[in-house]
Image: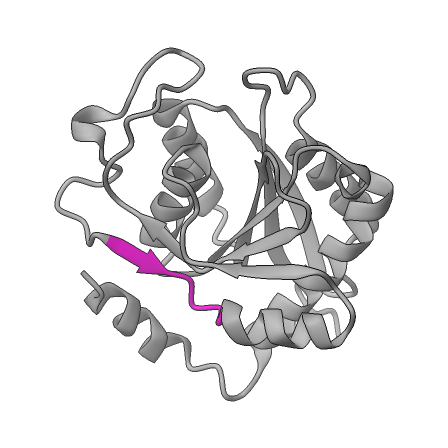
């Protein structure tokens, strides 16, 4: 009997500033080739570094009803991989590639101040560190497009999204080193989602109460 595949979407960002080739998008393409195992259908999507256009792309992605969306973004100056717990709604004052900021500098008017992923990034980071991976736990995604996209995705997908910041330069930024580590991290995310102790509905209610 055939079983249907679950969809996991991985996004990376398009060019901006000096990053004509964005390492996050190169990593997404590498993950599409690597895959996450049997029963998982991997889709990838490049998100423009534009507040308005990014929301349009995310609306299209969420219509696919994925199991989870994995957003990859770059963190200039970072030496390791950062797992972000929280997306924030307000204070988006840095202009995008079109020279624009979102209306009222916010993502969703009237939305909660912050939203958390249903994935417990703190316990995930501890688990990954025990496996020898150099990962960092964070609750501040930087209030630029990565943070904006993360919040919008958490809002649309009831917390079923993840944001991973990767180095913008250095040896770890190369797909050859980065993709295998991201593959391990994302497989751990999927295992946490599938674990019996992971009560999605309760955690979604919890994140929506955090204002």
- The colour scheme used here is one colour
- The C terminus: image quadrant: bottom left
Q: Residue at x 50, y 47 (%)?
A: 64
What x and y, as percent, mark residue 103? 19, 25
Residues shaded magenta: 114-120
Which one is in front, 112 or 127? 127
**Residue 102 shown in magenta:** no
**In the orientation shown, which residue stands out farthest toward the bottom?**
197
Look at 40% across and 51% down and name the residue there: 140
* Whether residue 88 is situated above or below residue 191 in the rendered picture: above
Residue 119 covered by magenta stretch: yes
53 or 38, which is in the foreground?
A: 53
Q: Position of residue 193 (x, y in %)?
A: 55, 73
Q: Is residue 133 above or below residue 73?
A: below
Residue drawn where x is 46% and y is 38% of the image: 146
Residue at the left extreme?
Answer: 110
- Determine whether, in the image, residue 104 is placed left or right of residue 171: left
């Amino acid at each position: 009997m055939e079983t249907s595949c679950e969809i996991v979407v991985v996004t990376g960002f398009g060019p901006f500033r000096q990053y004509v080739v964005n390492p996050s998008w190169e990593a997404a393409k590498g993950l599409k080739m690597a895959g996450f195992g049997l029963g998982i259908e991997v889709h990838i999507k490049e998100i423009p570094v534009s507040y308005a256009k990014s929301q349009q792309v995310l609306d299209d992605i969420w219509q696919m009803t994925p199991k989870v969306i994995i957003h990859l973004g770059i963190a200039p100056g970072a030496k390791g991989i950062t797992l972000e717990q929280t997306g924030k709604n307000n204070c988006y004052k840095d202009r995008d590639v079109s020279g624009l900021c979102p209306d009222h500098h916010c993502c969703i008017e009237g939305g909660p101040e912050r939203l958390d992923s249903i994935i417990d990034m703190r316990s995930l980071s501890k688990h990954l560190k025990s496996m020898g991976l150099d990962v960092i736990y964070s609750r501040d995604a930087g209030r630029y497009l990565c943070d904006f996209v993360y919040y919008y995705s958490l809002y649309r997908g009831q917390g079923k999204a993840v944001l991973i910041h990767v180095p913008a330069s250095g040896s770890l930024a190369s797909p050859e080193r980065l993709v295998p580590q991201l593959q391990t991290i994302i497989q751990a995310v999927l295992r946490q989602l599938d674990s019996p102790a992971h009560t999605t509905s309760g955690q979604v209610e919890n994140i929506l109460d955090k204002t």
